[in-house]
Amino acid sequence: MISDPIAVLCVLTAVVLISVRLEEKFNLFKSLGSALVGILLAMLLSNIGIIPGTSPVYEFLVGPGVSVGIALILMSVDMRSILKAGPRMLAAFGIGAVGTAIGAVACGLLLANQVGPETWKLSGQFTGTYTGGGMNFAALGKALDTSSDLFTAAIAADVIVTAIWMAACLAVPVLLGRTGRSADSNKIDGIPAGTDQTGTLEHALHNSGKPVPLTDAAALVTIAVGSVWLAGWLGSLFSFLPEVLWLTTIVLLIAQVPAVKNLSGGAMWGNYLMLLFLASNGAQSVIINIINYGPAIFYFAAGTVIVHGIIIFGVGRLCRIDLPTLAVASQANVGGAASAMAMASARGYTDRLLPGIIAGLLGYAVGNYTGYAIAIMMRGILGGGG
């Protein structure tokens, strides 16, 4: 098995390169998208033992790596996209959050005998993590004092299910619509999508459009890394607001400066970091971890997300919300703000980048509250030790 961090990073970069080339050359892979191909390829390499399921490289990409990617992409985003897609995205997010809570309660009731006396804790933790991402899972585990063995098993299940659901959300708009966009996705809340912004940024995610001078590259790196550092410092100083909210605010303010708008290459490099981030998610999905701890935990996580998916896509379509918005909102629920943004950039849903981040931030804000409430309710229903 390849374990050296530099070698692991080399494999991930090769996975991204192969995925992008396949997307360019073959219609099948173009429909799937390089992000989905990268997740599946990295997952395969991890599960057959070529690369490890844990690595410092993955920790970097999930932390500073994806933060720099977010900053680079946000420097190219028009803030008007919030006004166009915000209300519909938030509605989809709300439907998904309700679906998550229903799924966590149902799975808790069905699997209580297999999981044991701490079932109520998992109901709360999976409600939290599939409302706003893994940060909520860790916070709720600490608050509920979940046993270490159960916590570790649930983390393994969460990583695998989250990666699989990202792949599913990337595929859903293709499977249920003839293209990556549904028929009504050209309008967001009745307003035609901004063709200038959408077209320009969507193209910029794959091609800078012009040579990138060294001064532009240096400026982009300085702004992105500096913004991540400043967001982290502010997040530690004012802990009532998550770091990603500080990062989003800082970069959006900087992005309105004309000189920053003229910098080339930021969106493309940000998209590349997002593809590496998604590949690392696939690599962490080691199925043997679930086998070691027993399948009931996996069934719990998977069942919660399946119910979430049925409700958000079923009810969402009945409410005439387009598939791209539902897919990004679902990622905001299940994976958090970074996953929502990765989903939007990977599929070219550029008018949903900022609304997806907003939905993910809302998930961070409410996930702990809803998760704790569900846990207390389930403890009352099931009784519970631990």
Image (cartoon, rainbow, N blue to C red):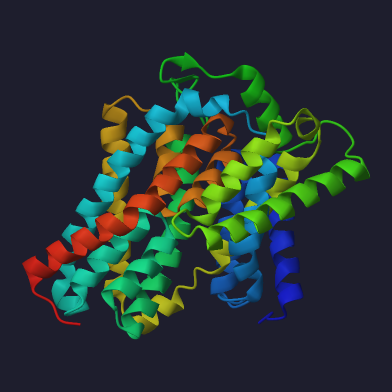
Tell me where residue 253 sits by quadrant: top right
Q: Is residue 354 above or below residue 67?
A: above
Image side of residue 115 versus residue 328, left or right: left
- Nearer to me, 162 or 216: 216
Image side of residue 138 versus residue 203, left or right: left
Query: Is the C terminus in the top left, top right, bottom left or bottom right quadrant?
Result: bottom left
Give residue 226's position: percent from left, percent from top. Answer: 73, 53
Q: Is residue 51 visible?
A: no
- Nearer to me, 252 or 199: 252
Q: Residue at x 51, y 33 (%)?
A: 352
Give residue 300's position: percent from left, percent from top. Answer: 27, 66
Image side of residue 227 versus residue 341, left or right: right
Tell me where residue 10 sits by quadrant: bottom right
Q: Residue at x 44, y 56 (%)?
A: 240
Q: Residue at x 48, y 35 (%)?
A: 355
Give residue 304's position: percent from left, percent from top. Answer: 28, 57
Q: Is residue 4 above or below residue 207?
A: below
Seen from this angle, which residue lies furthest front? 237
- Nearer to me, 96 or 128: 128
Tell me where residue 195 sits by quadrant: top right
Give residue 211's position: percent from left, percent from top. Answer: 90, 36
Query: Is the N terminus in the top left, top right, bottom left or bottom right quadrant?
Result: bottom right
Q: Residue at x 75, y 31 (%)?
A: 261
